[in-house]
Amino acid sequence: MKILEHFKCYCSFWKPSLARRISLYFLLFGLIIFFVTSMLYMIGAKKHFIGSTSKLINDQLSQLDGSNEPDYIWKGINRPQPQLYRLLKILANLSSSFYMVSEISIYSKTPDGASWYRLDFPDGPTLQSNRISEDPYTNKLDRWLKHRFRPAKAKIYSDNGSHSMFVNITTENDVQHYFLKIGVDSQGITGVMHKQMKHFVVFFLVALIILRFLGYYFARKISGPIENLSEISTDVAKGDLSKSAPVTTNDEIGELSKNFNQMIEGLRERERIKIIEFELEKGRQIQMEFLPTHIPQVPNYEIATSFYPARKVSGDFYDVFTLPDGRISLVIADVCDKGVGSALYMALFRSLIRVFSNQALSEQLSAAVKSAQKDKKVDSILPSGIDPVSGLRAVADTNNYIALNHGEEGMFATLFLGILDPETGWLYYINGGHEPPLIISPNGIKEKLEPTGPAVGIIADTVFGIRRIQLEPGDILIGYTDGVTEARSPQDELFTRNRLRSLIEQPFSSATELLERIKNNLFSFIDIAPRGDDVTMLAVQRITLV
């Protein structure tokens, strides 16, 4: 900061600023210390003056002839006391340019405590006594005598503008009490106070200037980093996360700068996470588009699905589509691992199954059409004449593609692919290491479709067995992923196949009702526990004709 800016900042003390506030606090604190110190100094000076004066007077009195005798002052009344007279005269002449001693006398109280007497030298060295009838100081002296705890040696009393110092000159042998009164004129006291006031004003002005500059200097030392941090925080609030606070000290301000930089790093990380979450949300939307937007309506069949990803993107998928020969392809799969990688491979597996299934049947249909055209028997070409297992070649083709082209990533999927002939109810299927789908009749579980080969995508040229089973009217085929059986409760208990089996064996009226029953029980079991895997289910029911 330039000198002119410092001067403007120094003079603009009314504007809100941390430096000015600290400077003001520093000034007020310094002034309080100054006032307290001045008061303590004045009190100490007063005590020192009273103590030294009392000691001086008592020392001088102790050197008088006969001072060792009890009540030697009282016994000297109406008798010449040249030494005492000379001592009081010396004290009376101790005036200065600011004050003047107006009266010196001795106050004495009789042993019975009934009367006070004033002893003085009105006409020479002969000591005279007068009984005091009215005096504002006698009551104060009585209260003084009542204080037995740490009795004072001298005190200064004021009354109606007059000021007097009383020194206790009573010795241990005296029966009566004696106080030497030294009266000071009010103008003299005023002069002393005026002198002290001038000194005080000068000290006050010097202290004000010094404390103001010291306060401003230390305020800038303290508030400079804070103001710099405030400017950086303003830029950060506007969205500039490239800023960072310099750490120049190891004190609380340095810790504040470190914490601020950690906050900035946290905001940067949060921005990166927001970008990732945005991309994941886009990925989720794209992935949802890979799932069938509508399920084919097949006469005399009901097809129901459930899909609940554990994260933004999923490695599970299902698919239901119509093949060129009119049969229905049923797919349910679970790609290994979690997150974005499994989601990308989910899209790849789903696309390959669709492409290879349609390609195999299209090639067979094309060959059949050419043969029929050659024999002029086009009308004899029927879907039922197509080999139903040709569409299942998609599993082997997909396995070889993944193993040969992406084997280094070690990605694979457990996959069930079934081809259903709606007219006959025959289901031709391959189970590549997937959870066994179940065939359920009204009487309970009818069949488990065990794996016919390993998971898809591990080893090229793997041979997958083909099986078939017929769905009778009223039967339901239900397939699911391990996210159902391996779901965990808040007590870390598995859902298990047995619990799923108990739900399946209960009476049901439709595939939709069955999946809804499983879903409600499953999510009630999971409750608040985090879901570690995706939940995917596919059910196909052959409706009983009435």
Image: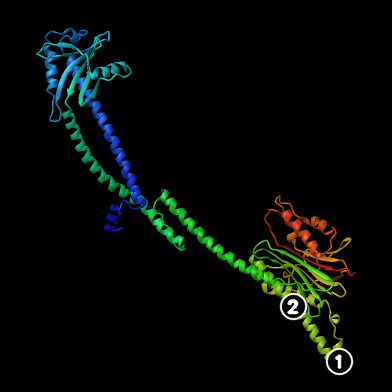
Q: Quadrant of the C terminus?
A: bottom right
The disc label shown at residue 356, or none: 2
Q: Looking at the rendered structure, which numbered label has been put on residue 241?
A: none
Across and down, in percent, residue 324 comes to 78, 80
The three-letter code of the residue at mark 1 reads Asp
Q: Residues within 10 Å of mark 2 (few under 14, many from 20)?
A: many
- Which part of the image, by quadrant, shows the N terminus? bottom left
- Circle 1 packing at 10 Å, graded few (<14), some (14-19), many (20+), is few
Residue 111 position, x and y percent, is 26, 8
**Whether residue 327 is visible:** yes
* Amino acid tagged 2: Phe
> Can I make out residue 408 in this image?
no
* Alpha carbons under labels 1 and 2: distance apart: 29 Å
Q: Residue furthest right?
A: 546
Q: Residue furthest front?
A: 134
What x and y, as percent, mark residue 508? 84, 61
Residue at 28% x, 37% y is 35
On the picture, is 352 further left or further right than 507? left
Q: Quadrant of residue 279?
A: bottom right
Q: Is residue 130 left or right of residue 124?
A: right
Q: What residue is disc 1 on?
A: 375
Whether residue 398 is situated above or below residue 374 in the rendered picture: above
Q: Is residue 458 above or below residue 95?
A: below
